[in-house]
Image (tube, rainbow, N blue to C red):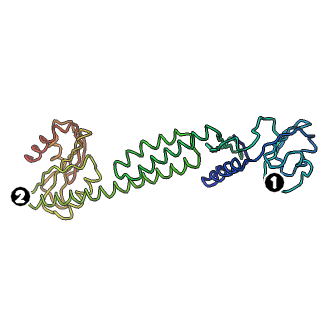
Amino acid sequence: RFDFSWSGPLTPAQLEAVEQILVDQIAASIPVDNYVAPLEDAQKISSLRAVFGETYPDPVRVVAVAPSPITEILGNPQDVQWNSYSVEFCGGTHLKNTSEAGGFVLLSEEGIAKGVRRITGVTMKDAAVAMASAAEFEGKVTEAGKLEGLELEARVKLLVPELEGLSISAAKKIRLRETLGTYGKQVVAWKKKHAAERTSKIVEQVIEAAKSTEGDKVIMRCDFGVDGKVAKAVTAAYGKKVKDKALLMVSADEVADRFMVVAFAPKGMKGVDCKAWVVAATEGTKGKGGGKKDSAQFSVPGVGSLEGVLEKARSF
Protein backbone atom coordinates (compact mmCIF):
# COMPACT_ATOMS: atom_id res chain seq x y z
CA ARG A 1 0.00 0.00 0.00
CA PHE A 2 1.06 3.61 -0.51
CA ASP A 3 -0.25 6.79 1.15
CA PHE A 4 -0.03 10.14 -0.61
CA SER A 5 -1.36 13.68 -0.37
CA TRP A 6 -4.22 14.46 -2.78
CA SER A 7 -7.37 16.51 -2.72
CA GLY A 8 -9.89 13.89 -3.84
CA PRO A 9 -10.54 10.45 -5.35
CA LEU A 10 -8.57 9.48 -8.43
CA THR A 11 -10.51 9.17 -11.67
CA PRO A 12 -10.60 5.85 -13.53
CA ALA A 13 -8.13 7.28 -16.06
CA GLN A 14 -5.74 8.28 -13.26
CA LEU A 15 -6.02 4.86 -11.63
CA GLU A 16 -5.21 3.24 -14.97
CA ALA A 17 -2.24 5.57 -15.43
CA VAL A 18 -0.83 4.78 -11.97
CA GLU A 19 -1.27 1.06 -12.55
CA GLN A 20 0.41 1.27 -15.95
CA ILE A 21 3.39 3.16 -14.52
CA LEU A 22 3.99 0.30 -12.08
CA VAL A 23 3.58 -2.31 -14.79
CA ASP A 24 6.05 -0.47 -17.01
CA GLN A 25 8.60 -0.13 -14.21
CA ILE A 26 8.39 -3.86 -13.50
CA ALA A 27 8.82 -4.65 -17.19
CA ALA A 28 11.85 -2.33 -17.33
CA SER A 29 13.76 -4.57 -14.88
CA ILE A 30 15.15 -1.65 -12.84
CA PRO A 31 17.68 -2.50 -10.09
CA VAL A 32 16.64 -1.85 -6.47
CA ASP A 33 19.57 -0.72 -4.32
CA ASN A 34 19.86 0.12 -0.63
CA TYR A 35 22.67 1.87 1.20
CA VAL A 36 23.22 3.31 4.67
CA ALA A 37 24.49 6.88 4.29
CA PRO A 38 25.10 9.91 6.50
CA LEU A 39 21.78 11.73 6.94
CA GLU A 40 23.19 15.08 5.82
CA ASP A 41 24.55 13.63 2.58
CA ALA A 42 21.37 11.67 1.82
CA GLN A 43 19.16 14.73 2.32
CA LYS A 44 20.98 16.50 -0.53
CA ILE A 45 19.56 14.10 -3.14
CA SER A 46 17.23 16.22 -5.30
CA SER A 47 14.63 13.50 -5.92
CA LEU A 48 14.50 12.31 -2.32
CA ARG A 49 11.05 11.39 -1.01
CA ALA A 50 10.73 11.77 2.74
CA VAL A 51 7.75 12.18 5.08
CA PHE A 52 7.30 15.75 6.31
CA GLY A 53 7.86 16.04 10.06
CA GLU A 54 9.40 12.56 10.33
CA THR A 55 12.61 12.15 12.32
CA TYR A 56 15.21 9.95 10.63
CA PRO A 57 18.24 8.24 12.16
CA ASP A 58 21.81 9.22 11.31
CA PRO A 59 23.11 7.36 9.39
CA VAL A 60 19.93 6.57 7.43
CA ARG A 61 19.02 3.71 5.13
CA VAL A 62 18.39 4.89 1.58
CA VAL A 63 16.53 2.79 -0.98
CA ALA A 64 16.62 3.65 -4.69
CA VAL A 65 14.77 2.14 -7.61
CA ALA A 66 17.15 3.40 -10.25
CA PRO A 67 19.63 2.13 -12.85
CA SER A 68 22.51 3.71 -10.91
CA PRO A 69 23.68 2.59 -7.45
CA ILE A 70 23.08 4.90 -4.50
CA THR A 71 26.82 5.61 -4.16
CA GLU A 72 26.75 7.18 -7.62
CA ILE A 73 23.62 9.17 -6.74
CA LEU A 74 25.31 10.48 -3.58
CA GLY A 75 28.29 11.54 -5.70
CA ASN A 76 26.09 13.86 -7.79
CA PRO A 77 22.94 14.35 -5.67
CA GLN A 78 21.48 17.29 -7.66
CA ASP A 79 21.52 15.56 -11.05
CA VAL A 80 18.04 15.95 -12.61
CA GLN A 81 18.08 12.41 -13.99
CA TRP A 82 17.34 11.09 -10.49
CA ASN A 83 13.92 12.78 -10.68
CA SER A 84 12.74 9.96 -12.93
CA TYR A 85 13.36 7.37 -10.23
CA SER A 86 12.31 6.57 -6.68
CA VAL A 87 14.76 7.46 -3.90
CA GLU A 88 13.50 7.17 -0.32
CA PHE A 89 14.47 6.75 3.32
CA CYS A 90 13.13 3.32 4.19
CA GLY A 91 13.92 0.49 6.57
CA GLY A 92 11.82 -2.15 4.87
CA THR A 93 12.78 -5.26 2.92
CA HIS A 94 12.85 -4.84 -0.85
CA LEU A 95 13.38 -6.71 -4.09
CA LYS A 96 16.70 -6.68 -5.84
CA ASN A 97 15.09 -5.82 -9.14
CA THR A 98 11.60 -4.58 -10.12
CA SER A 99 11.18 -7.56 -12.45
CA GLU A 100 10.93 -9.82 -9.39
CA ALA A 101 7.48 -8.33 -8.71
CA GLY A 102 6.20 -10.21 -11.75
CA GLY A 103 3.20 -7.93 -12.23
CA PHE A 104 1.08 -5.33 -10.50
CA VAL A 105 -2.63 -4.71 -9.99
CA LEU A 106 -3.98 -1.63 -8.18
CA LEU A 107 -6.89 -3.02 -6.16
CA SER A 108 -8.24 0.04 -4.38
CA GLU A 109 -7.90 3.76 -3.77
CA GLU A 110 -9.49 5.47 -0.78
CA GLY A 111 -9.29 8.42 1.56
CA ILE A 112 -7.85 7.70 5.02
CA ALA A 113 -7.65 11.28 6.34
CA LYS A 114 -8.26 14.81 5.14
CA GLY A 115 -6.07 15.33 2.08
CA VAL A 116 -4.51 11.85 2.35
CA ARG A 117 -5.31 9.00 -0.02
CA ARG A 118 -4.20 5.37 0.02
CA ILE A 119 -3.73 2.98 -2.86
CA THR A 120 -3.45 -0.75 -2.28
CA GLY A 121 -2.02 -3.14 -4.82
CA VAL A 122 -0.71 -6.66 -5.22
CA THR A 123 2.22 -8.24 -7.07
CA MET A 124 3.49 -11.70 -7.99
CA LYS A 125 0.93 -14.53 -7.71
CA ASP A 126 -1.77 -12.28 -6.24
CA ALA A 127 -1.47 -9.96 -9.24
CA ALA A 128 -1.75 -12.90 -11.61
CA VAL A 129 -4.88 -14.14 -9.82
CA ALA A 130 -6.43 -10.66 -9.94
CA MET A 131 -5.74 -10.33 -13.67
CA ALA A 132 -7.16 -13.77 -14.38
CA SER A 133 -10.29 -12.98 -12.36
CA ALA A 134 -10.76 -9.72 -14.27
CA ALA A 135 -10.35 -11.45 -17.63
CA GLU A 136 -12.85 -14.15 -16.69
CA PHE A 137 -15.40 -11.61 -15.51
CA GLU A 138 -14.92 -9.43 -18.59
CA GLY A 139 -15.84 -12.51 -20.63
CA LYS A 140 -19.06 -12.87 -18.66
CA VAL A 141 -19.92 -9.21 -19.19
CA THR A 142 -19.26 -9.54 -22.93
CA GLU A 143 -21.55 -12.58 -23.14
CA ALA A 144 -24.23 -10.75 -21.17
CA GLY A 145 -24.09 -7.95 -23.72
CA LYS A 146 -25.43 -10.37 -26.34
CA LEU A 147 -28.68 -10.74 -24.38
CA GLU A 148 -31.62 -8.38 -24.16
CA GLY A 149 -34.77 -7.74 -22.23
CA LEU A 150 -35.60 -9.90 -19.23
CA GLU A 151 -32.70 -12.27 -19.90
CA LEU A 152 -30.25 -9.37 -19.75
CA GLU A 153 -31.91 -8.04 -16.60
CA ALA A 154 -31.57 -11.40 -14.85
CA ARG A 155 -27.93 -11.72 -15.86
CA VAL A 156 -27.08 -8.20 -14.66
CA LYS A 157 -28.67 -8.93 -11.28
CA LEU A 158 -26.23 -11.83 -10.92
CA LEU A 159 -23.16 -10.02 -12.22
CA VAL A 160 -23.44 -6.84 -10.11
CA PRO A 161 -22.89 -8.51 -6.70
CA GLU A 162 -20.30 -10.84 -8.20
CA LEU A 163 -18.31 -7.85 -9.45
CA GLU A 164 -18.37 -6.12 -6.06
CA GLY A 165 -16.90 -9.23 -4.45
CA LEU A 166 -13.96 -9.52 -6.86
CA SER A 167 -10.38 -8.49 -6.02
CA ILE A 168 -9.43 -7.00 -9.38
CA SER A 169 -8.01 -3.79 -10.78
CA ALA A 170 -9.89 -0.82 -9.29
CA ALA A 171 -9.96 0.90 -12.67
CA LYS A 172 -11.32 -2.20 -14.41
CA LYS A 173 -13.93 -2.63 -11.68
CA ILE A 174 -15.15 0.92 -12.28
CA ARG A 175 -15.27 0.38 -16.06
CA LEU A 176 -17.11 -2.93 -15.65
CA ARG A 177 -19.55 -1.33 -13.21
CA GLU A 178 -20.24 1.36 -15.81
CA THR A 179 -20.83 -1.29 -18.48
CA LEU A 180 -23.32 -3.12 -16.27
CA GLY A 181 -24.99 0.23 -15.61
CA THR A 182 -25.32 0.71 -19.36
CA TYR A 183 -26.88 -2.74 -19.64
CA GLY A 184 -29.36 -1.71 -16.95
CA LYS A 185 -30.36 1.33 -19.01
CA GLN A 186 -30.81 -0.92 -22.04
CA VAL A 187 -33.18 -3.10 -20.01
CA VAL A 188 -35.22 -0.05 -18.97
CA ALA A 189 -35.43 1.09 -22.61
CA TRP A 190 -36.45 -2.42 -23.69
CA LYS A 191 -39.15 -2.56 -21.04
CA LYS A 192 -40.55 0.81 -22.12
CA LYS A 193 -40.63 -0.27 -25.75
CA HIS A 194 -42.10 -3.66 -24.88
CA ALA A 195 -44.73 -2.06 -22.65
CA ALA A 196 -45.66 0.40 -25.40
CA GLU A 197 -46.04 -2.40 -27.95
CA ARG A 198 -48.02 -4.55 -25.52
CA THR A 199 -50.24 -1.63 -24.56
CA SER A 200 -50.92 -0.88 -28.23
CA LYS A 201 -52.02 -4.48 -28.85
CA ILE A 202 -54.29 -4.49 -25.81
CA VAL A 203 -55.87 -1.20 -26.89
CA GLU A 204 -56.62 -2.74 -30.30
CA GLN A 205 -58.20 -5.76 -28.61
CA VAL A 206 -60.50 -3.80 -26.30
CA ILE A 207 -61.58 -1.42 -29.07
CA GLU A 208 -62.39 -4.36 -31.35
CA ALA A 209 -64.27 -5.97 -28.49
CA ALA A 210 -66.27 -2.77 -28.01
CA LYS A 211 -67.24 -2.75 -31.68
CA SER A 212 -68.58 -6.29 -31.52
CA THR A 213 -70.29 -6.00 -28.13
CA GLU A 214 -73.94 -5.04 -27.75
CA GLY A 215 -75.09 -3.08 -24.73
CA ASP A 216 -73.15 -0.58 -22.67
CA LYS A 217 -70.51 -2.86 -21.10
CA VAL A 218 -67.39 -4.55 -22.47
CA ILE A 219 -65.97 -7.35 -20.30
CA MET A 220 -62.82 -9.19 -21.21
CA ARG A 221 -59.63 -10.82 -20.03
CA CYS A 222 -56.37 -9.48 -21.46
CA ASP A 223 -53.28 -10.44 -19.48
CA PHE A 224 -50.57 -7.86 -18.97
CA GLY A 225 -49.71 -8.74 -15.40
CA VAL A 226 -50.66 -6.60 -12.43
CA ASP A 227 -49.40 -3.39 -14.04
CA GLY A 228 -51.37 -0.29 -13.14
CA LYS A 229 -49.48 1.88 -15.63
CA VAL A 230 -50.50 -0.34 -18.54
CA ALA A 231 -54.08 -0.41 -17.30
CA LYS A 232 -54.16 3.38 -17.10
CA ALA A 233 -52.69 3.74 -20.60
CA VAL A 234 -55.22 1.27 -22.04
CA THR A 235 -58.25 2.91 -20.45
CA ALA A 236 -57.06 6.39 -21.54
CA ALA A 237 -56.70 5.21 -25.16
CA TYR A 238 -60.04 3.36 -24.95
CA GLY A 239 -61.79 6.51 -23.74
CA LYS A 240 -60.60 8.45 -26.78
CA LYS A 241 -62.09 5.90 -29.19
CA VAL A 242 -65.15 4.56 -27.40
CA LYS A 243 -67.71 6.95 -25.89
CA ASP A 244 -70.76 4.79 -25.19
CA LYS A 245 -69.52 1.61 -23.48
CA ALA A 246 -67.89 0.99 -20.12
CA LEU A 247 -64.94 -1.39 -19.96
CA LEU A 248 -64.00 -4.01 -17.36
CA MET A 249 -60.67 -5.79 -17.86
CA VAL A 250 -59.20 -8.67 -15.90
CA SER A 251 -55.43 -9.21 -16.13
CA ALA A 252 -53.57 -12.03 -14.38
CA ASP A 253 -50.03 -12.58 -13.16
CA GLU A 254 -49.85 -16.37 -13.07
CA VAL A 255 -46.43 -16.43 -11.39
CA ALA A 256 -47.51 -14.15 -8.55
CA ASP A 257 -50.93 -15.89 -8.42
CA ARG A 258 -52.75 -12.56 -8.47
CA PHE A 259 -54.94 -10.65 -10.88
CA MET A 260 -56.28 -7.14 -11.23
CA VAL A 261 -59.74 -5.98 -12.12
CA VAL A 262 -60.02 -2.59 -13.82
CA ALA A 263 -63.22 -0.80 -14.75
CA PHE A 264 -63.51 2.40 -16.76
CA ALA A 265 -66.38 4.53 -18.07
CA PRO A 266 -65.77 7.08 -20.86
CA LYS A 267 -66.30 10.73 -20.01
CA GLY A 268 -69.97 11.68 -19.96
CA MET A 269 -71.24 8.12 -19.59
CA LYS A 270 -73.57 8.04 -16.58
CA GLY A 271 -75.15 4.60 -16.72
CA VAL A 272 -72.37 2.51 -15.10
CA ASP A 273 -70.84 2.92 -11.62
CA CYS A 274 -67.34 1.45 -12.07
CA LYS A 275 -66.55 1.13 -8.37
CA ALA A 276 -69.82 -0.64 -7.64
CA TRP A 277 -69.21 -2.86 -10.66
CA VAL A 278 -65.75 -3.96 -9.48
CA VAL A 279 -66.90 -4.41 -5.88
CA ALA A 280 -69.73 -6.69 -7.04
CA ALA A 281 -67.46 -8.67 -9.36
CA THR A 282 -64.81 -9.27 -6.68
CA GLU A 283 -67.19 -10.01 -3.83
CA GLY A 284 -65.91 -12.91 -1.70
CA THR A 285 -62.42 -12.91 -3.24
CA LYS A 286 -60.55 -10.86 -0.58
CA GLY A 287 -59.74 -8.39 -3.32
CA LYS A 288 -58.69 -4.88 -2.31
CA GLY A 289 -58.69 -1.60 -4.15
CA GLY A 290 -60.67 1.52 -4.71
CA GLY A 291 -61.89 4.02 -7.23
CA LYS A 292 -64.70 6.30 -8.28
CA LYS A 293 -67.83 6.09 -10.38
CA ASP A 294 -65.89 6.54 -13.62
CA SER A 295 -62.91 4.28 -12.82
CA ALA A 296 -61.89 1.63 -10.29
CA GLN A 297 -59.12 -0.91 -9.76
CA PHE A 298 -58.87 -3.93 -7.45
CA SER A 299 -56.10 -6.47 -6.85
CA VAL A 300 -57.25 -10.00 -6.12
CA PRO A 301 -55.20 -12.91 -4.70
CA GLY A 302 -55.61 -16.35 -6.24
CA VAL A 303 -55.94 -16.71 -10.00
CA GLY A 304 -58.36 -19.57 -9.39
CA SER A 305 -61.20 -17.14 -8.71
CA LEU A 306 -60.69 -15.19 -11.96
CA GLU A 307 -63.44 -16.87 -14.00
CA GLY A 308 -65.92 -16.34 -11.21
CA VAL A 309 -65.10 -12.62 -11.20
CA LEU A 310 -65.75 -12.44 -14.93
CA GLU A 311 -69.14 -14.15 -14.49
CA LYS A 312 -70.17 -11.73 -11.75
CA ALA A 313 -69.03 -8.80 -13.90
CA ARG A 314 -71.19 -9.99 -16.79
CA SER A 315 -74.25 -10.30 -14.56
CA PHE A 316 -73.85 -6.87 -12.95
Identify the element where label 2 is drawn: loop
**Residue at the outermost left position:** 214
Mark pair 1, 2: CA separation: 91 Å
Crowding at mark 1 (Cα within 10 Å: few <14, some 14-19, many 20+)? some
Name the residue that disc number 1 marks. Answer: 83
The number of numbered discs placed on residues in the rendered structure image is 2
What residue is shown at x 83% (from left), y 51% (from top)? 47
Label 1 or label 2, whichever lies nearer to me, is 1
Q: Percent position (x, y) of residue 291? A: 24, 48
Is residue 292 left or right of 213 when viewed as pictured? right
**Residue at the outermost bottom position:** 241
Q: Percent position (x, y) of residue 18? A: 67, 51
Residue 87 or residue 304, whichever sits in front:
87
Name the residue that disc number 2 marks. Answer: 214
Is residue 41 left or right of 239 when viewed as pictured? right
Q: Percent position (x, y) of residue 225? A: 25, 47
User: Where, by quadrant of the figure, is residue 182 drawn?
Assistant: bottom left
Q: Quadrant of the N terminus?
A: top right
Residue 4 or residue 268, whichever sits in front:
4
Q: Amino acid at mark 1?
A: Asn
Q: Percent position (x, y) of residue 161? A: 47, 40
